Image (cartoon, helix red, strand yellow):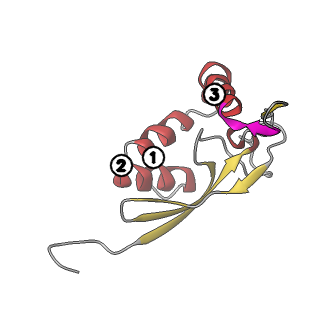
Amino acid sequence: MENGEIGLSMISLSICIDCGVDTDPYSHAQMGWVNRIPSDTTVKNLNIDAWLCGTCCGDEFDEEYDAETGEYNSDSKWEAVEKYQEEVWYPAVDSKDQNAKKWREAINDEDVPRIHALKEEIDGTG
């Protein structure tokens, strides 16, 4: 590595990478039944092994079928998901878990040091 570059590192999280809800089925902070799928992402030099919860995957929303073209329109589905996240889901998650909003902000801002600090906080090592 040159000029103080840091190599690629990895952390594993049980949170949803979109909303910050804890998807661990054995967690005290989990919000009811959460259907989750793996959602690995990279933020700068950090690989994050995390999840997408059912809400952020759009499980509760359907694509509209266009009878004229015989095709499904997913745009309306994702617009509905985003509206639901902003108006209902994020506030519900935030009321249950004080770190959820911090996770969303740190990931959206690509703030790797803050992501590490939040990980240490939830692991009890920070």
Can you tell which quarter of the image residue 55 is in? top right
Mark 3 neighbour class, 10 Å CA radius: few under 14, some 14 to 19, many 20 or more: few
Q: Amino acid at mark 3?
A: Glu
Which element type, helix, strand or loop, lies under badge 2?
loop
The answer to whether the residues at label 1 and label 2 have Cβ atoms under 8 Å apart is: yes
Q: Which mark is residue 107?
A: 1
- The x, y position of residue 62, in whole percent, is 81, 34
Q: Which residues are magenta?
A: 70-75
The answer to whether the residues at label 3 and label 1 have Cβ atoms under 8 Å apart is: no
Which element type, helix, strand or loop, lies under badge 3?
helix
Report how many numbered discs are placed on residues in the image: 3
For the point 45% across and 46% down, which residue is it? Answer: 107
The residue beneath circle 3 is 79
The residue beneath circle 2 is 111
- The x, y position of residue 1, in whole percent, is 23, 81
Q: Nearer the viewer, mark 2 or mark 3?
A: 3
For the point 50% across and 54% down, which residue is it? Answer: 119
Mark 1 neighbour class, 10 Å CA radius: few under 14, some 14 to 19, many 20 or more: many
Q: Nearer the viewer, residue 115 or 126?
A: 115
